[in-house]
């Protein structure tokens, strides 16, 4: 059964032609199948010749029966004559064929009908489509027309508005004119009334005069004539007088004109100066720019030409005092100023466009960078300033906080105490030291004062002693040596006695200054056991006088030394 | 600031002599002449009727007293009190009377403006000038007194005649291009005569001394035109105030408009300093402090709309006054009658707006300093100067309502005129520094 599928393709064209030549032969059961296919025009359905062979008759029959059953022809089954399947029962087969033919005819008729129907429908559709497009076009057209009408309407509305405003203005003007007419009319009527009143008065006066007939003559009654105000006599009216009046009048007019002309000339000169200045400055401004190659050489030459022109004109204007050249020079000046101004303006425009170009292209123009960096710098500085300000502010706040919180919290107070504790301790120590020192000083001062007092007393005693000794000496210039020795021993004892407080004094002094002299002092004392030490020696050992001064042996020297001691006392007391 | 005592006067006739020494006042039919400094009565003259007009002669030797009802003019002499002069116009009547600039001729305008009679006091001669025009300002003398311009109307046409005051010789006589000449004024330098038309037509004509038309100026057509005209003291500017509430300044070189000052009801310009004078009474002789209230702009000025049906409506700039140093121009717009506008002529802009509580009756510039005195009919005197402004109460019992004022020509004092009274106000010299 599967054979006829595979041969389909190869048998396409030749089979169609072979099918057309196939005739009905009873031996070949597959012929009716091909005749069935004949009315079907040019289809590639060409497997029929291979449908039934001598081998598969029964299968074919069963297949065909199945098909017939599916078509609804159950009553007309084809039967085989023999079980081998080479023969076929004619009656059912013919019936089947007939039924099939009937079915075919019916279907063909329905197909025809359908085709007709389809044709009709397609034609109506075409008709619809054309009518649709026509209607669409019509719609579009009408829409356009509508918009056109709208437009016209709008324009007409606009026109109406303008006409209305015109009408309004006209009405206003009419009203204004009417008010003017009214005011003029009222003025005229007022004037007319006034004139009428005056005329009436005149008439009245005239009638009165005519009636009265007493014409009061006009008269002047003067006590005496006056002199003229300028003191001169009156003149007769002569032609000369008339001429002189004319002359006077013209003179005054001329002087007035001259004065005004003078002032105008001055003004003119000043303005000209200003213009010259302007021209010079404009030339000056334009000349360096044109030399930088911006303009064409033609420009340069023009510039130079104008410059030279300018020079000429400057020369001209210096000669401008002549009236004849005024007009000409003025024109030249104004023209040259105009030209310069035009050039300046063009130049400025060029500069403007250049600047805008540069700005657009963001080229690094020398003038731009500093500006930018300047701006950056400014920004940076502003930020810094801001930061500093904030910092200061924060610090201020903290300080404030501290100050505030120190009064409020105990802990804050304690904290404060902590910070100052060390200082306080130190301070306390120093106070202690200070107190001690103060005490020491007090003690020493006391000692000093005592010593000073004692010294003073002992000095006095010493003086007395010395005086006596001297007296003795003097008196002992005689050969009374015993007494001298006694007195000298007294003196010695006195001296030694006296030396003690001195020793103490010096010791105290030494304590203050150096303690080294103490030992030096003690040794001379031991050596001076026998002989009477001379006072300078004593003082020298007491370190009260420098050792070199041996000249102070005399009494005068002693007095001086006393004074030094006194000074020393004073110093010590201090 | 010292105030003298109050004296009687009638008819607002009170004038200081041109040399500044004497003050002449009229009380009914008496003429009282006082010394300005002591206010002692020097002379007392009696006229034949109530005095309608009084005028000093230019040399301060004679006073003219006109009595219009009787048609009489009496002239009195200061040097010789016995001297008398009486001019009777007869049945022709008298409408106005004035001195000529030389002080020896009197010009009388007869009733109905039939003619002007020129009486000479030197020769007792009379001359007539026919067809003078009856208008707002038909006669003007030039400042130096050499020429007189007179408006005439003949055959429905306007003419101007220029006379030489010396001998009344007719120098020029020409027709003007006006419809109805309303006034004429000489420029202070005596070379240009400004002639303007009536308010029905805005036209200002400028004629040279020899009668040539120099220029015509017309700002607009049809609406009511020129209301007032004033020359600046230097003859540089001609200020024209018109009914459209604007002042137009014409320059003397091109005779074209160089500036236009408007008087809007709302002052908005930041250049204007609006000053409202304060109404506080001050004690005499104290240094007057500055009491201005400088208002914040914009300031609304009260406007009174005039009756549209009446003739000569109360609208437009009616008074123009230049200060003596040429720096300021004071104007008054009639529908804002309580405000005086002061314009700076150097900057050509508004300097100040002085707003008062009631309508300003009179204002006048000091002849020596840029100081403006104004009064509104109440008992106060207002002074404005560029430094500030001040209000002074006139210290009189019974109230002294200041109706008008006049500056003394040289003495730094003011004459205040009430309805029937007059008072002198002496400025102290230390206030000159203000």
Image: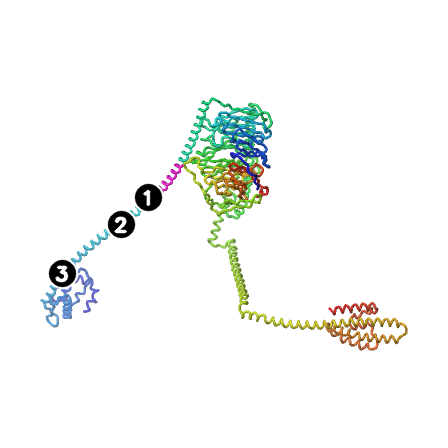
Which residue in the structure is indicated by mark 1? Answer: A156
Dot 1 or dot 3, earlier in sequence: 3
Mark 2 — on which chain does it sit?
Answer: A
Residue drawn at 41 percent across, 37 percent down: B308
Residue situated furthest left in the rendering: A91
User: Are there few (<14), some (14-19), or many (20+) residues within 10 Å of tag 3?
Assistant: few
Dot 3 or dot 2, earlier in sequence: 3
- In the displayed structure, would residue A159 be above or below residue B75? below
Quadrant in the rendering for residue A451: bottom right
Q: Is residue A471 left or right of residue B409?
A: right
Please report contact status of discs 1 and 3: CB closer than 8 Å, yes or no: no
Image quarter hosting the C terminus of chain A: bottom right
Image quarter hosting the N terminus of chain A: bottom left
Spatial CA distance of label 1 from label 3 is 73 Å
For marks 3 and 2, give the one nearer the viewer. Answer: 2
User: Are there few (<14), some (14-19), or many (20+) residues within 10 Å of tag 1?
Assistant: few
Camera-side residue of B346 and A453: A453
Measuring from the top left, give residue A356's x and y in whole percent. Answer: 47, 51
- Residue A314 seen in the figure: no
Spatial CA distance of label 1 from label 2 is 25 Å
Camera-side residue of B424 and B124: B424
Q: Is residue B197 left or right of residue A60?
A: right
Camera-side residue of A277 and A189: A189
Mark 1 — on which chain does it sit?
Answer: A
- In the displayed structure, would residue A43 be above or below residue B310? below
Measuring from the top left, give residue A384's x and y in whole percent. Answer: 53, 60
Spatial CA distance of label 3 from label 2 is 48 Å
Which residue in the structure is indicated by mark 2? Answer: A139
Quadrant in the rendering for residue A74: bottom left
């Amino acid at each position: 059964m599967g054979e006829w599928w595979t041969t389909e393709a190869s048998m396409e064209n030749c089979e169609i032609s072979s099918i057309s030549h196939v005739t009905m032969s009873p031996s070949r059961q597959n012929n009716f199948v091909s005749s069935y296919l004949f009315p079907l025009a040019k289809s590639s359905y060409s497997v029929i010749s291979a449908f039934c062979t001598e081998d598969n008759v029964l299968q074919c029959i069963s297949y065909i029966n199945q098909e017939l059953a599916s078509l609804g022809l159950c009553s007309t089954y084809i039967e085989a004559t023999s079980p081998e399947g080479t023969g076929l029962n004619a009656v059912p087969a013919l019936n089947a064929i007939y039924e099939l033919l009937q079915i075919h005819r019916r279907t063909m008729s329905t197909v025809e009908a359908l085709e007709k129907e389809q044709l009709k429908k397609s034609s109506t559709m075409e008709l619809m489509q054309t009518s649709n497009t026509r209607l669409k076009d019509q719609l579009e057209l009408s829409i356009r027309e509508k918009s056109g009408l709208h437009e016209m309407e709008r324009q007409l509305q606009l026109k109406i508005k303008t006409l209305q405003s015109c009408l309004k203005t006209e009405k206003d003007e009419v009203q204004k004119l009417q008010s003017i007419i009214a005011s003029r009319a009222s003025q005229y009527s007022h004037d007319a009334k006034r004139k009428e009143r005056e005329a009436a008065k005149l008439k009245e006066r005239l009638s009165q005069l005519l009636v009265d007939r007493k014409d009061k003559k006009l008269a002047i009654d003067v006590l005496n004539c006056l002199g003229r105000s300028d003191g001169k006599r009156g003149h007769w009216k002569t032609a000369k007088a008339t001429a002189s009046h004319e002359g006077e009048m013209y003179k005054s007019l001329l002087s007035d004109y001259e004065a005004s002309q003078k002032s105008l000339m001055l003004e003119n000169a000043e303005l000209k100066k200003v213009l010259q200045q302007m021209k010079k400055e404009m030339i000056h401004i334009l000349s360096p720019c044109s030399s930088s190659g911006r303009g064409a050489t033609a420009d340069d030459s023009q510039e130079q030409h104008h410059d030279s022109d300018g020079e000429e004109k400057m020369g001209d204007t210096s000669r401008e005092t002549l009236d004849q050249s005024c007009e000409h020079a003025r024109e030249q000046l104004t023209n040259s100023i105009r030209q310069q101004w035009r050039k300046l303006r063009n130049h400025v425009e060029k500069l403007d466009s250049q600047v805008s170009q540069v700005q657009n292209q963001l080229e690094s123009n020398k003038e731009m960078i500093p500006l930018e960096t300047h701006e950056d710098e400014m920004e940076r500085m502003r930020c810094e300033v801001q930061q500093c300000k904030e910092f200061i502010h924060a610090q201020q706040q903290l300080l404030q906080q501290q100050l505030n919180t120190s009064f409020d919290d105990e802990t804050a107070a304690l904290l404060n105490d902590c910070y100052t504790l060390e200082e306080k301790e130190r301070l306390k120590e120093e106070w202690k030291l200070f107190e001690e020192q103060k005490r020491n000083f007090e003690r020493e001062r006391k000692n000093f004062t005592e010593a000073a007092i004692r010294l003073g007393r002992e000095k006095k005693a010493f003086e007395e002693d010395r005086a006596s000794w001297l007296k003795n000496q003097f008196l002992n210039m005689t050969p009374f040596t015993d007494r001298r020795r006694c007195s000298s021993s007294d003196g010695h004892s006195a001296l030694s006695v006296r030396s003690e407080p001195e020793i103490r004094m010096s010791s105290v002094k030494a304590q203050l200054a150096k303690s080294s002299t103490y030992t030096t002092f003690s040794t001379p004392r031991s050596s001076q056991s026998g002989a009477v030490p001379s006072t300078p020696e004593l003082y020298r050992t007491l370190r009260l006088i420098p050792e070199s001064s041996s000249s102070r042996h005399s009494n005068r020297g002693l007095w001086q030394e006393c004074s030094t001691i006194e000074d020393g006392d004073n110093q010590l007391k201090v | 600031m010292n105030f003298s005592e109050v004296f009687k006067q009638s008819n607002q006739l009170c004038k200081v002599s041109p040399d500044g020494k004497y003050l002449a006042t009229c009380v009914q039919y008496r003429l009282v002449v006082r010394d300005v400094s002591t206010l002692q009565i020097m002379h007392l003259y009696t006229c034949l009727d109530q005095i309608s007009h009084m005028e000093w002669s230019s040399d301060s030797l004679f006073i003219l007293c006109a009595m219009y009802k009787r048609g009489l003019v009496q002239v009195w002499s200061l040097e010789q009190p016995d001297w008398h002069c009486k001019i009777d116009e007869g049945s022709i009547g008298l409408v106005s009377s004035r001195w000529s600039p030389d002080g020896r001729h009197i010009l009388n305008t007869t009733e109905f403006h039939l003619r002007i009679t020129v009486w000479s006091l030197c020769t007792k001669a009379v001359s007539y000038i026919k067809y003078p025009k009856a208008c707002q300002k038909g006669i003007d003398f030039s400042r130096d007194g050499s020429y007189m311009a007179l408006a005439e109307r003949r055959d429905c046409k306007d003419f101007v005649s220029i006379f030489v005051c010396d001998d009344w010789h007719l120098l020029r006589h020409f027709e003007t291009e006006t419809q109805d000449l309303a006034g004429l004024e000489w420029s202070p330098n005596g070379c240009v005569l400004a002639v303007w038309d009536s308010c029905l037509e805005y036209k200002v004509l400028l004629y040279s001394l020899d009668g040539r038309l120099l220029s015509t100026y017309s700002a607009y057509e049809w609406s009511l035109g020129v209301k007032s005209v004033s020359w600046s003291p230097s003859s540089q500017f001609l200020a024209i105030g018109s009914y459209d509430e604007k002042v137009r300044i014409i320059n003397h070189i091109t005779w074209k408009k160089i500036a236009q000052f408007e008087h809007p009801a709302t002052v908005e310009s930041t250049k204007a300093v609006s000053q409202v004078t304060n109404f506080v009474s001050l004690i005499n002789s104290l240094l007057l402090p500055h009491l201005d209230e400088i208002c914040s702009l914009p300031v609304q000025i009260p406007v009174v709309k005039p009756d549209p049906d009446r003739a000569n409506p109360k609208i437009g700039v009616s008074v123009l006054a230049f200060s003596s140093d040429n720096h300021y121009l004071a104007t008054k717009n009639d529908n804002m009658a309580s405000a005086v506008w002061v314009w700076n002529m150097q900057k050509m802009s508004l300097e100040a707006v002085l707003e008062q509580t009631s309508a300003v009756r009179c204002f006048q510039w000091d002849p020596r300093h840029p100081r403006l005195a104004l009064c509104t009919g109440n008992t106060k005197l207002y002074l404005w100067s560029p430094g500030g402004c001040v209000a002074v109460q006139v210290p009189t019992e019974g109230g002294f309502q200041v109706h008008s004022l006049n500056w003394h020509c040289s003495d730094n004092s003011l004459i205040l005129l009430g309805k029937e009274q007059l008072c002198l106000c002496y400025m102290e010299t230390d206030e000159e520094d203000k």
